Structure formats: structure tokens, C-alpha cells
Amino acid sequence: MRTTIVERDRLVPRSREDDSAPWNGGARIWNDSGAGCTVGFGVREVATGTNHLLSAGHCGSVGSQWSDGQGEPIGVQTHKNTDHDTMLIGTASAGGWLYVGGSNDEVKARVVGWTEVFPGQLLCQSGATSAWEIGVPVCNLEVQFHYDDREDLVEATQLDGDESARSGDSGGPVYAVNANGTVLAAGTTTRSAGPGFGFQDFATARDDFGDIVPVTGTAATCRVSFTVVNSWGTGYEAAVTVYNDGPQVTGWNVGWTFGGSQVVQGHWNGVFQQTGATVTVSNENHNATIASGGSVSFGFTADGPATNPAPFTLNGATCS
């Protein structure tokens, strides 16, 4: 019996260092002058519905072009309050989630609103550089007081004596965590010194830029497991399982977009259609129903590298 070992490409998920629209909080961003900071929150103007990203004013100037960690354009900086260290980047698509894991994973928390800050409140900050160095957000940031001066910042202290923030965390999200794991926007990172932490609160950003609110994430009702079960020099075999966390589904369509030139060749347990990089899989007669709390599985072979397709949708709704 002969055993063959085949080396395949590493799966590369969407991450802080390579985000894509709709743009998420906690992701790395760069301006056209080479300055790197972190997205705070996706926000929208209530009156007009216009989308922006909120970050730190010292990161750039009005008119600066901002891009993600891989150079994909995000938008142009439209507003800045120098005293309060706040700014807005105009963008067509702002997201309602925050990266709360390491630099190269997809661990995110859903934003559901914003909160006033007060002394004694415990908050977290999720800057891109801290994620790179420690792999998690910095929490146990206890609010101490609100300055009453030109800068109008909030002072906090990391209660364990750890570094409260790092270079490149500027503009990143400061937030309160709810019991169910969702988060409330509290502000954006401005400066730090050891366990000392200074940030601008979200209420002040609203004073600066009018009636802005965080873009809120929609709770996903489906989850997807994508596994490469075999690979070879020119292609691979994948297994996909879709878990339904919502009401029963009768008749389903699962969709995704390949990140490269992959082409589906063989498939099973679903009816496949591919147009360019976009793939749609619909049910067969024997698996048309996915019970609430149930799942459905199918598979395929494809030519091309085994990169992770995203996002997956179930009947048009994005899955986690």
C-alpha cells in the first residue's frame, strides 16, 4: 500500500489584516501617507443613512485616502476634530461587527448599540497591534474620570497592570461587553502609557459629527463548516455543512464567492450553478428541509487552490 502526501495551500480567512467590505471595527487601516491605525466602529448618519468609519483624528487629515491591510481602498477621510482626536472616513459599506480575536482569524463580536461611559465602568479595547502581540483584546480597563478641558478625553486604567494599548491601536474600538457576548460602542483609543489609557467616548464623537450611531450587526441564523478533505496539485475536494440556528427551512440555496479562479468540477447532495467566482447550491428532493437546529451537508471537487470561500449565505442571509 502506497501513501502519498500532498502539500496544499494554507486557508486564508478574512481577518484584521485583510478585511473587506462591509468594513469591521478592529481592522488594520493605512492612509496614503503610510500611517497605520485601527478602525473603531462602522457608523451611519441617522438623517441621511451615510456610512462612515470612526477612528482617531491624529491618524490622518481630511482628504486622506484610507485602505485596508492589503491595500484595498476603503474611502476618503471626510471629517476631523483635532481637539477631541476623532475622525470619520467615508465609505460605501460599514459593518456592524468587531474583530476580537488575533490578527489572522475571523473571531468577531456583534455591535448592538452604544453606551455612555462612567467612573468604575469596565471596558475593553481591541486594537490591531495588541491583537498581533497578545492575540486578544485588552480588557479590565476601568474608567477613572472624564477630563473637563480642550481635549475632553476619558482616562482609564488597566487593572492588572498590563499594557493598555500599543502603537497602531489608535482609533480602535473601546467597548462594553454584554452578558450575551454582544458589545456596545464606548469610544476610540487615543493614547496610552503602561496601564494608563486615554480614549474619546462615543458621546463626544456624536457631539462632534452630529447624530451618528453605530452600524449594528445582524445576528446570523446559520453557521457554515468548510473543510478541505483532500487536495492535489491542481485541485481539491471540500465538504460543506450548513447549520440552521433559525426557523425550519424548506427549500434552500447556499451561496458563496471563490477568492480566485476555482472552478467546481464534481459535486454531490446539491444542485450546483457557477457564474464566474459565484457559486449557488440548491437542495435536492431528499434534503430540501433543514430543521431548526438541524444541518445539511454537501460536497464538491474543484480545480484551483484550496482557499476559503466567503461569505456563505443561506437563502440570501449571511452565515457566520
Image (spheres, grey):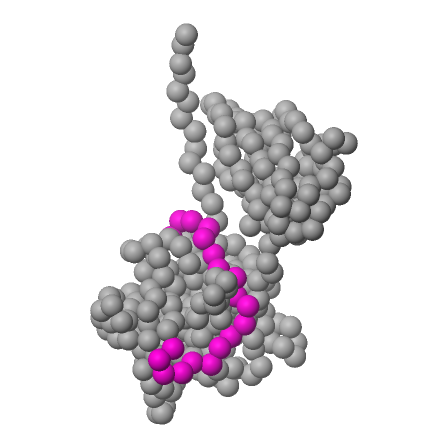
Specify the principal SS of the magenta part: loop
Residue at far top of view: 1
Highlighted range, magenta: 103-121
Residue 38 position (above or below residue 78): above
Towards the viewer: 219 or 204: 219
Q: Is residue 27 magenta?
A: no
- Please name the residue shown 62% across and 34% down the image: 297
Residue 184 position (above or below residue 83): above
Q: Where is residue 169 in the image (x, y as percent from the top left)?
A: 35, 65
Q: Does the magenta stretch include residue 115?
A: yes
Residue 315 position (above or below residue 157): above
**Residue 145 appears in the picture as rendered:** yes
Quadrant of the rendered structure where residue 143 is? bottom left
Quadrant of the rendered structure where residue 295 is? top right
**Residue 91 appears in the picture as rendered:** no
Towards the viewer: 57 or 172: 172
Q: Where is residue 253 in the image (x, y as percent from the top left)?
A: 71, 42
- Please name the residue shown 55% across and 63% down the image: 96
